[in-house]
């Protein structure tokens, strides 16, 4: 008969006890004292190196920490395992290795047809009306007024410009981008023997330079009072009028991408950003929500930095995604690790929006089981599930771990290719480049001219993005299979020439838009 003495159990057979003496953890000791009837079962389940029958219950127990706790891998396993229910993260979120309790994902009804809105379709009649969707008569009139105001103050014998002059100025900027002349001096574009005749026919070089110098978007004398509260004061009015129209003109498809665009600029600006991963490295950062199929910029927001004297913003990525997808439902948002978090996933689900994105390994919502790479084979995948979210850890090669979070995918599916990538990664790779593609095309055929004024740099970027989206509208508006006719009826030859000129300026992404025209 076993006897209980203090915190130790002694065998009746002392010779056998000396051979079978072993140590137990504090938790096992407490369980054995509170439930002595099941102590023998606990002994059997806690030991891996020794085998003890039910009859050998006379084992000495000494209160001490478990020697296995010094092993880092064992410590990690104990932290992540939640007895019988899966893995527990640092913030208490419980993940399961199986999706038995995970709810099925059912996309919400959208009620919108992807592509140009009815409002846009009713306005588009030709090439000019398509571009006027973005630079409306109100926007052009505002530029005319502010430019004349600045010209009258700074230039002697100033002759007022009108809407035709401003449109001609914008047209020459676009044409310079088509010719890839953003690094070329403006004077060379007007030279008789090597320049372009259309530049000389439109306006003189002197007038172009004068308009370039006096171009303004606000009243400079009223700016100081507004600038104290708004860093974007020199172009705020124009920017809001332009960005307000973008969602009105186009309905994105079922996949959108939220990312950053860096407009190159090295001049003086309080909110100029340095991003070493971008080709330009220095510039103005713009958050963009782009349609995956067409790279249409559905919403844009300039990052003006933190307010003076304030602390760094916490949860900036979450705020940006929520603001940039406001008004959408039934779609899937793709973003990188700067934005992705478990809290963002749950907030988007309340709006009937799914998310797919990479996630940083230091996020407290991730179980440490997904962070372990030492014992993992290359090309292996490990999934974790909650009731509405899936996390995956993929090892592309030994020692490297790729982590993603998705509320769209609810099963441990992998592709059949050689690398056996999870379907989550395949979908992420397909959708992640919408903003990068927009930035690439705009950068290759940009109308930007050399300037030290950041409002003008931003204005040039607005023209670039508008020209690209103008092309998207034209290709979606033209009936499939239609051909130009020299006798009129739809587009004239000149209109088609304008269209193909724009296609040349956006040729690297034309295939994305043309997909929607093919059966």
Image (spheres, helix red, strand yellow):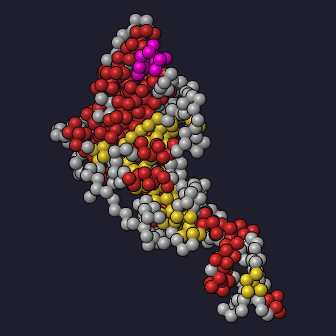
Which residue is located at x 41 percent, y 12 percent? 151
Q: Majority secondary structure of the magenta segment?
A: helix
| 347 over 212 or under it: above or below | below
State yes or no: residue 214 in magenta. yes
Image point 45% across, 23% down: which residue? Answer: 234
Q: Position of residue 105 (x, y in %)?
A: 37, 63
Name the image quarter holding the N terminus. Answer: bottom right
Count the marks: how many?
0
Asked if residue 359 can be seen in this view, the reply is yes
**Does 62 lie within the magenta span?**
no
Among the 4 quarters of the image, the one containing residue 219: top left
Q: Quadrant of residue 244?
A: top left
Front residue of 261/13: it is 13
Residue 504 against residue 186 in the figure, above or below: below
Q: Quadrant of residue 32?
A: bottom right
Task: Please provide percent x and percent y for residue 220.
Answer: 45, 16
Q: Position of residue 285 (x, y in %)?
A: 51, 37
In this picture, residue 1 sits left or right of residue 253? right
Residue 17: image x %, image y %?
A: 79, 89
Query: What residue appears at the point 56 percent right and 67 percent down from the top-left corner?
Result: 87
Magenta stretch: give its range.
213-226
**115 lies above or below 242:** below
Looking at this view, name the residue that lies furthest to the top.
157
Q: Residue at x 62, y 84 (%)?
A: 38
Q: Is residue 33 left or right of residue 502?
A: right
In this picture, residue 403 sits left or right of residue 258 = right
Say which quadrant the C terminus sits in.
Answer: bottom left
Quick check: can you spot residue 272?
no
């Amino acid at each position: 008969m076993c006897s209980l003495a203090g915190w130790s159990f002694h065998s009746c057979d002392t010779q056998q006890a000396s051979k079978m003496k072993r140590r137990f953890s504090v938790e096992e000791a407490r369980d054995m004292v509170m439930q002595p009837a099941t102590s023998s079962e606990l002994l059997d389940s806690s030991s891996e190196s020794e085998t003890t029958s039910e009859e050998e219950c006379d084992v000495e127990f000494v209160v001490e920490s478990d020697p296995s706790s010094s092993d880092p891998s064992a410590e990690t396993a104990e932290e992540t395992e939640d007895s019988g229910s899966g893995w527990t993260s640092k913030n208490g979120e419980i993940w399961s290795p199986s999706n038995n309790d995970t709810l099925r994902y059912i996309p919400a009804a959208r009620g919108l047809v992807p592509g140009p809105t009815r409002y846009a379709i009713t306005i588009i009649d030709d090439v000019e009306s398509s571009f006027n969707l973005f630079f409306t008569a109100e926007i052009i009139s505002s530029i005319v007024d502010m430019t004349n105001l600045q010209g009258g103050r700074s230039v002697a014998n100033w002759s007022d410009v009108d809407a035709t002059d401003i449109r001609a100025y914008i047209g020459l900027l676009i044409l310079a981008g088509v010719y890839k002349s953003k690094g070329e001096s403006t004077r060379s574009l007007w030279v008789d023997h090597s320049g372009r005749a259309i530049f000389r026919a439109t306006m003189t070089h002197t007038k172009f330079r004068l308009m370039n110098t006096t171009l303004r978007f606000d009243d400079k004398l009223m700016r100081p009072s507004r600038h104290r509260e708004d860093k974007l004061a020199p172009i705020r009015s124009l920017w809001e009028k332009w960005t307000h129209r973008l969602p009105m003109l186009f309905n994105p498809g079922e996949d959108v991408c939220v990312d950053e665009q860096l407009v190159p600029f090295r001049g003086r600006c309080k909110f100029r950003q340095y991003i070493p991963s971008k080709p330009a490295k220095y510039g103005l950062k713009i958050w963009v929500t782009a349609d995956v199929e067409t790279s249409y910029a559905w919403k844009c927001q300039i990052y003006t930095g933190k307010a003076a004297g304030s602390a760094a913003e916490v949860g900036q990525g979450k705020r940006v995604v929520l603001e940039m997808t406001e008004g959408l439902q039934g779609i899937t948002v793709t973003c990188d690790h700067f934005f992705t978090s478990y809290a963002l996933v749950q907030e988007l689900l309340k709006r009937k929006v799914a998310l797919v994105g990479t996630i940083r390994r230091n996020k407290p919502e991730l179980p440490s089981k997904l962070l372990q790479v030492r014992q993992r084979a290359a090309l292996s995948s490990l999934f974790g599930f909650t009731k509405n979210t899936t996390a995956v850890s993929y090892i592309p090669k030994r020692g490297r771990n790729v982590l993603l979070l998705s509320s769209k995918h609810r099963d441990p599916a992998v592709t059949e290719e050689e690398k056996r990538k999870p379907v989550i990664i395949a979908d992420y790779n397909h959708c992640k480049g919408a903003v990068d593609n927009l930035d690439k095309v705009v950068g290759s055929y940009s109308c930007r001219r050399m300037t030290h004024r950041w409002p003008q740099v931003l204005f040039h970027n607005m023209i670039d993005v508008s020209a690209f989206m103008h092309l998207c509208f034209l290709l979606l508006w033209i009936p499939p299979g239609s051909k130009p006719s020299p006798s009129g009826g739809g587009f004239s030859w000149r209109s088609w020439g304008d269209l193909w000129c724009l296609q040349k300026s956006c040729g690297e992404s034309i295939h994305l838009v043309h997909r929607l025209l093919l059966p």
